[in-house]
Image (cartoon, grey):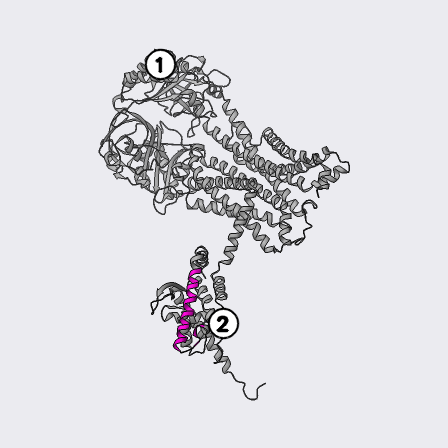
Amino acid sequence: MNPLRDLFERCKALLFHARQEAELDEEMRDHVARETAARQRDGRAQASREAAIAFGGIERTKDEIRDASGVAPLREWFADVHYAIRALRRNAGFTLTVIGVLGAAIGAATVVFTVVQRVLIAGLPYPDPDRLVRVYQQNSATNRWSLSVVDLQAIAAQQRTLESFGAWQATTASLSGAGAPERVRVGRATSGFFATLQVATLRGRLLEPQDDSPSAAPVVVVSYRLAARLLGGPDQAIGRRVTIDGVTHAVVGVLPAGRDELGGITAEAWPILQLRTPLRRGPFGFGAIGRLKPGVTLEDARADLAGVSERLFPLWVAGFQDREARLTPYPLRDAVIGDAGGQVKLFAGAVALVLLLAIANVATLMLVRTASREHELSVRVALGAGRRRLIRLVLTECFVLVAAAGVLALVIAFVAIKGTALVAPTLPRLGELVVDGRSVAFALVLTFVAGALISLAPLSSRLVRGYGAASLAISPARTGPGRRAGIVRGVLVATEFALALPLVTGAGLLLTSFLRLQRVDPGFDPTGVYAVLIALPGGRYGDPATSQAFWRLAESRASELNGVTAAGLAGSIPPDNGGDVNNFDLLDRPVPTGTAQPVVPWSTVSAGYFAALGIPLLEGRLFTPGDSATAPPVVIVSRAWAAKYYPRSSAIGRQLYNGGCSTCPPTTVVGVVGDVPYLGLASATEGMYAPLAQDGPRTLNLVVRSRLDAGASFRALRAVVASLDPDLAPTEIPMQEHLEQALGDPRRWTAVVSAFAMTGMALAALGIFGLMSYVVRQRRREFGVRLALGASPRSLGLLVVQGGMRYAGAGTLVGLGLVTFESRWLGALLYRVEATSPVVLLAAVALLLATGLLSCWRPGVRAARIKPLEVISGE
Amino acid sequence: MADEPNDLLQGTLELLVLKALSLGAMHGWGIGQRIDLLSNDVFKVHQGSLYPALQRMLRKGWVKAEWRMSENNRRARYYLLTRLGERQLAAETSSWQRASGAINEILRVQLAPGGA
C-alpha cells in the first residue's frame, strides 16, 4: 500500500468529517431502499423489515466503516497535540526558551551550511566549471604573482592543453556616459576571457577576437546594472558611446542581471584589453584564465605551461633572472575562493559548537522538566494510562517543540542569509547566496536529529521506562532524583561547559589579536589627512612630459589651498593600498644567479608626501627637484629596509638594480624614513620610494594635511582637479576612516565570534542554573530535615554551589582538550598572539568558572533560605 | 454448504468486489447482487460487511467513489475500478488460480492401496 496515499485518504476523512458522515448515512439508506424494493418485487409482504434484518445493524456497520477509514488514530494524535500545546503554554518560559534556543541555533547552522555550500563547495556558475583554471607565475609554493604581456603572448602561441585562454586587468576608471564622469570598477579583458568562461550576453555581443588588436576600435561590454543606471536600460545601451579614462568606447553588449562578477572579478564595465608589443619581460599585473581541453588534467597543463616558461626564460633573461619562476595553473574555483576558506571554517566551527551547546542545553531542560512532572505522570499511570500512552504523550510534546523550533529556524535562515553580506562583506561569491532546497533539507534533517536527541531525555525518565508505574507514592518531594537520570543530567551540563570553553577561548584570542592590531603604529598621523585618487587617461596624457606637468601643477595648487599645511603625491597609500611591489638586487650583495630577488612594496612619491603624512626623515635626504628624469636614479628606503639589509652600517649611498634591469644604471639609496605598512596593518614595513620625476605614473594619490574638515578639504581638492581637467573623476579617501577600515575584517570576525562565545556562556549558565534549581526543589524536604537537625544554612548553600561547580569544573577540564584542536586552525587568523597563549586560556577558564559560580549562587541561596517548619509541616 | 451463506475471508471478498466492479461501475447494493449472481448464489455476501471492505479499498486506491444518478433517477454512490485496482485484480486472480490449482492437486491425492 502506498503510505502517502493512505495518509492522504485518512486526512481527507478527518477533514471532511461532517460530509463523510452525511454521505455514509445516505449510502446506507439507499442500500436498504434498494433491498426493500427488490424484495417487494419478489412479492414479500414485510419487505422493508426483512431488508433491515438482512443488512444487519446500520450503526454497527457505520462504526466498522469509520474504523476502516483509519481516522481514529489520527484523531487521537490531534488530541495529543492539542493537549501538548496546552501543557506547553502553561509553562511558557520553558517553551519559549527551548524553541528560541533551538530555533536560533538550527537557523544559524543552516545559514553557515548555505554559505559553505554556495561559497566553498558549489561549482562556479559557468559551463563545465571544473575545466577552468587560473594561471599564475610562481617561484615557490607560497609566492605567486600575475603575468606580463610577454607571458600572455607566449602562452597564447605555445600552449597545447588549453581550449581557450584569456587575460584581464582589474582596476578602477573614470567613466562617463551622458553625465558627469564617475569612478567605476572595470575589468579590462581580452576576448579569450569571455570565450573561456562561456558566458552569454543579455543584449548585443561579447568581446570578440577582432577587438583584441591594438588597431581595432575600442569596445566595451557593460553590466546590467551600469546599463540601467547610466545608459537608459539594456535595450538602449547597445551602440552608445562611453568614455573610459578619456578613451571613447562603443558599447557592444550588456551582461544579464546579476552578472556583476566574472571569474572572481567584480566590475561594472568590461572594456577590451588590447595588448601592445612588450619591450621587456615585466611589468606583471595581468590575470589569466584558461579552459582545459576535454580530458586534459591539471597536471598535463602544468607540464605544458612549465615548458613555455623554460623556453621563454633565455629570451628575456636580461630583465628577469628568476629561473625558478614557472607559469602554473590552479583550479579557478580555488583562486576565486582564496583565503575565505579559513574565515568560513571559523564561522562554521563556532556555529557547530553553539548548536551542540543548544541541544545539550535543551536536553537538560527537558530532563529537569520531565523529572519535575513525575508526580503528574504517576497520577496518569494510576488513572490507567499505559506505558505506550505516556511515551506518546512526552514524544508529542517534543514533536510540538521541535516543529516550532524548525519553523523558527527556517524563518531565521531566510532572514539571516541577507545579513551575511554585513558580517562578511569580503566573502567571495556573495551574490550567489540563497537559501535553496538543499539548505531547507539540511534544516529539516538537523531539526529531526535535534528532536531525536532531545526526546531521549524524557524517555529516560523512570516512569516512562516502566519502573514504579502505578505508584502514587512516587512524589518528587519524597525521593531523590533517579541515579541514572542524575548522571545523564550531570554529563549534559558538564558537556555544555566543555563546549563553551573553546568558544570563549577563541573569542579571547581573536580579541587579543584585534587589540594588538589596533595598537600597531601605522607610522603616520591620519588626523586631518585627506587624499584623492587621480587616474590620468592614456590618450591625452600618454606623453610622460604631459602627465609630469599635470602632477607638478596639482601638487603646487593643493599646497596653496587655504588651511593646507603640506601636500604631496604617492602611488600607494598606507596601510593596505600598496598596489605596487618591485624586486631589486643589491650591487654589493647580489642574489645567486637564477634565484628570486627580494620583493618589497614600492611607491612613487613626491617629496611633499612625507610631510603630508608625517613620515619622519631619519637619515640622508628627501627627493629634490634635482632628482629629475635625466639625473642618476635614486630611492629612499624605510627604516626596516635599512635595518634588514644593512643592520650594522648605513644604507645611504648603497646601490641596487631595480625591477630586475641589470643593464640599467644602478639606483642609489639617498635617504631613510620612518616605517609605514603598505600591504596591510600587520604586514612587514620594508619599503622603497622612488621620485616622481624618474617614473612616469598616470595614477597617483594627491594627499594633503589640512586644518579644515573633511567636507571642505575634499571640495577644495576636487576644485583643484577640475581646474586642471574637468573630465577626471577623483576618488575621495579620508585617511582616518581608511585606516579604520583596515581593521574592519578583524573587527567583524572578533564581534561575531564574541557574540557566539557570549551565547555559549549564557547557554551553559542557563543549563547549570536550571539543573541546580531543580536539585534544590527536589531535595527541599531533605534540606529541611537537615536544617531542623542543626545544619547551618550556609553549609547547605555551599553544598549546592559545590555540587554545581563539580559539573562546571569537570566540563571545563574536558574543554581544555577541545581547545588544543581549535588552536590548530585559529593560528592563521591571529596577529602577534599564540593560539596556545596560556594567559588567554587561563582568562577564559576563569571567566567560564565565574559564570558557573554566579549561576549556582541563586539556587544555593534558595537552599540556605529553606524554612524547615514549612517544608516538613507542608506535607 | 450451498444452504448457508459462506463466511468469506476478507481478501477473498475484496477479490470478488474487484471482479464485480471490473464489469462496470456499480453501487454497494448492486455489487452485492452481482457477486450473488455470478456465484450462482453460492456466496451470499453479508450486506453489512461490504461497505467496510469498500472503504479499505478506497484507502488503498483500488477503487474510487462518485455520486451518480442511478436507473430510477435516484442519487447513489457508485464505485469504479482504478488503474491500480485493475492491476490488483489481475495479480490476485493469477495468484488465486495458482493457489486453488495447488489445493486441487493436493485434494486429488489418494492413498495407494497397500501403503502405510
Residue A104, position in %: x, y? 50, 39
Q: Quadrant of the N terminus of chain A?
A: bottom left
Judge whether A235 appears above or below A520 on screen.
Answer: below
Which residue occupies the foreground of this view, A486 or A381? A381
Q: Which residues, given as a range, are shown in magenta?
A: A21-48
- Could you give the CA–CA distance between mark 1 and mark 2, rounded to whole angstroms? 112 Å
Tell whether position A20 is magenta: no
Q: Main secondary structure of the magenta part?
A: helix
Q: Chain of mark 2?
A: B
Q: Quadrant of residue A874?
A: top right
On-image quarter of the C terminus of chain A: top right
> Does residue A157 appear in this view?
no
* Same-chain status of marks 1 and 2: no
Mark identifier at residue A627: 1
Q: Is residue A720 above or below residue A62?
A: above
Secondary structure type for disc 1 = loop
**A6 relative to A87 in the view: left or right:** left
Q: Circle 2 is placed at which residue position?
A: B9
